[in-house]
Amino acid sequence: MPRRTVSVPHPKGDPTPSNFGEKDPLKSNGDPHASAPEEKVELRKKVTLLRGISIIIGTIIGAGIFISPKGILKNSGSVGMSLVVWIACGILSLFGALSYAELGTCIKKSGGHYTYILEAFGPQVAFVRLWADMIAIRPAGMAVIALAFGRYILEPIFMPCGVPEIAVKLATTIGITMVMYLNSMSVSWTARLQIFLTFSKLLAIAIIIVPGLYLLFKGETKNFENAFEVNTADLTGLPLAFYSGMYAYAGWFYLNFVTEEVENPERTVPLAICISMVIVMICYTLTNVAYYTVMSAEELLASDAVAVTFAEKLMGNFSFAVPIFVALSCFGSMNGGLFAISRMFYVASREGQLPEVLSMIHIRRHTPLPAVIVLYPITVLILFLGDIYSLLNFMSFLRWFFIGVAVVGLIYLRYTRPDMPRPFKVPIIIPAVFSFTCFFMVFLSLYSDPVNTGIGFAISLTGIPAYYIFIYIERKPKWFQKFSDSVNRSLQIILEVVPAEH
């Protein structure tokens, strides 16, 4: 789609966009005739190895491991099988992460799934993915994790009473606003906060693991006797256990959304992915071992918040701190997720598939401000008016379908573009096994919940007419083009953003 660049006067005076961000020549070494070097308006490479690891770990570890590992236990049928599922899902997720490491080093663009599908299968398929993400998946996902933040940050205040729903929604809105504001203001501060929150999560997990393993080594092994006895389980539930496990590990792909901002991506992306996945696998497995050491399978299944029950049994009054750690964990997932997702909208706009203003950068902050805040209105609307969990059910299978498509794209590119530089290359069996797993989970969704899956599929298919109306047809009515240019120009002035300089 051809782009129309709208030149906009600076809100204070009249320098051209290329002068935005220039330093005052009078401040250059005291010499009024010396001009300062121009500061380019662009997204900078500020994601180091540590920041990359914190993005991945910080978005994978949300509220799930603290609240509800019981879904896997319930569907696997025994303590031993649930631990096997946790490890197996970690290995399968590592396969997906390694596949994305190859994609991230041979396609050095930000945007994650969207960019890889665009590169392999063209703009139509990529737009359908983008459309589903924008109108439902991302706002609903953000609202759900933010709701968990709002509930758990207020729980210590209202203990032992329940938290009023309106208070939860107000705290949730404040949390979303804080995350949006921080991501709009500074890439460096967003990354620093993400590192802090990631260490907070790992500390919370250590507080669970260390006493649990201490008791285990002291001989508390009664809950592991006959660990593989499957007397209550229906083995048809095992695929559902894998579905829950894969969902708990989801988030390993977020570093690929910010590839252009990663220092030395050929080395940093694969290294950050491998280190992060090993840490998460170890944490998840040992946390579950600690839970089972202190609680029986029946107690775990009866608990609504496993970590809180664990803390009450083992730590007494200290248990009030657990909801705070869960809230910090949710905030870290929101922060890392938004940081990554905004880059997908930024890249999609740059490719001509979203309004032009979304690919612009703040003249002083050097953040993709419009792409960061674009989800804010629809997320808050869904939070107060929508049935979030139904929306997530509609869309959860689409996530795995499109991740599977992106990994199939890796295999496809191996044959169609064999000469493409691949600094990091995985054996072909790894993407093959992982993409098969994704499509199996999609088939499982169709089988176990055909109504919700069908609705999600129908919502995503609305992206096809949207593509032809907004993207494919180049000759738009003059009134539409005039309105579009006017909106772009107004937003550019209000938000103080300009196109990135290359």
Image: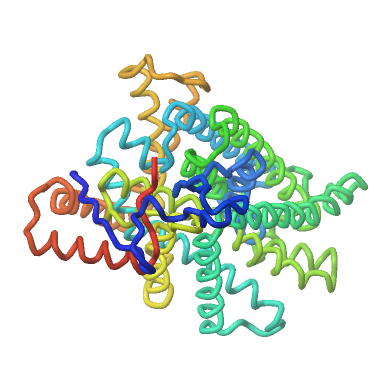
Q: Is residue 355 above or below residue 382?
A: above
Place of residue 8 in the rendered image (x, y in percent of width and height, measured from the top left)? 28, 60
461 left or right of 282? Answer: left
Q: Residue furthest top?
A: 419
Quadrant of the frame with the N terminus: top left
Give the residue drawn at x 44%, y 32%. 108
Tag count in the figure? 0
Give the residue drawn at x 38%, y 37%. 439
- For residue 493, which quarter of the picture? bottom left
- In this view, the residue in front, 315 or 37, is 37
225 left or right of 259? Answer: right
- In this view, the residue in front, 24 or 112, is 24
Q: Is residue 440 above or below residue 420?
A: below
Q: Is residue 95 visible?
A: yes
Give the residue drawn at x 54%, y 54%. 32
Give the residue drawn at x 46%, y 44%. 257
Q: Is residue 121 above or below residue 52?
A: above
256 left or right of 409? Answer: right
